[in-house]
Amino acid sequence: MSSIDTSLPDEIASVADADEDERLSKDVIFELLKNRRRREVLAYLLEADETVTLGELAEQIAAWENDTEVNALSSDQRKRVYVALYQTHLPKMDDAGIVEYDQDRGLISLADNADLLMMYLDTDTHRQDRWDRWYAGLSVVGTALLGAAVLGAPLLSTVPLAALAGVVVAAFLCLSTAHVVRNRSQERNVDGKLSRIE
């Protein structure tokens, strides 16, 4: 007999029973995210971006936990993670609609509600765009162009300085507009996700 508790917390069980419009409460989200292995499942599935087998998932998580390579794992290390994922973590995540878990075939993929948890994780894929780099690059290019024109660079000295300054300002205006449009799009995306959280 296994001593692992496979019962679902009340918050997750109620989501599994009600399944009302794919909504999750913050309690369920944080219940799922409080366990490191479940966070690692999400990170691996996000990186894989496809259906994976329980075996490969368990091996990678065991390798991360033991700070080693997959081929250097012992069978006990693999088995510990495999059993915990099989009996506890993946069923909880499946019941909450975070992963699609086919226990018979041992196949796992991200489900519709996974994006509700992803926004709480610090993953490379979900990091904010680095607009500061675009602004810094444009500043360097603009300064170089204007500086070269002032110093009398052959091609730039024929263009009026006011026209070059206008081009630089127009470039900043275009970049700022693109930044605002992108931010509004991301805000709508986040607002849509947050509307699915109770």
Image: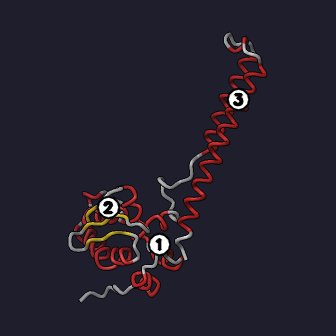
Q: Which mark is residue 33?
A: 1
First in sequence: mark 3 vs mark 2: 2
Looking at this view, name the residue that lies furthest to the right: 162
Instruction: Write down the residue under mark 2.
Output: 60
Please state, as top left, top right, bottom left or bottom right, where the N terminus lies in the image. Answer: bottom left
Q: Quadrant of residue 174?
A: top right
Task: Decide: is 149 above or below 182.
Answer: above
Per the model, the C-alpha gap separating discs 3 and 1 is 46 Å
First in sequence: mark 3 vs mark 1: 1
Residue type at numbered disc 2: Gln
Residue depicted at 62% across the width and 53% down the height: 184
Q: Which mark is residue 168?
A: 3
User: Looking at the picture, how far across and down is residue 191, in whole percent?
Assistant: 58, 64
Q: Say which of marks 3 and 2 sits in front.
A: 3
Residue depicted at 42% across the width and 79% down the height: 19
| Residue 28 placement, left or right of 80 | right
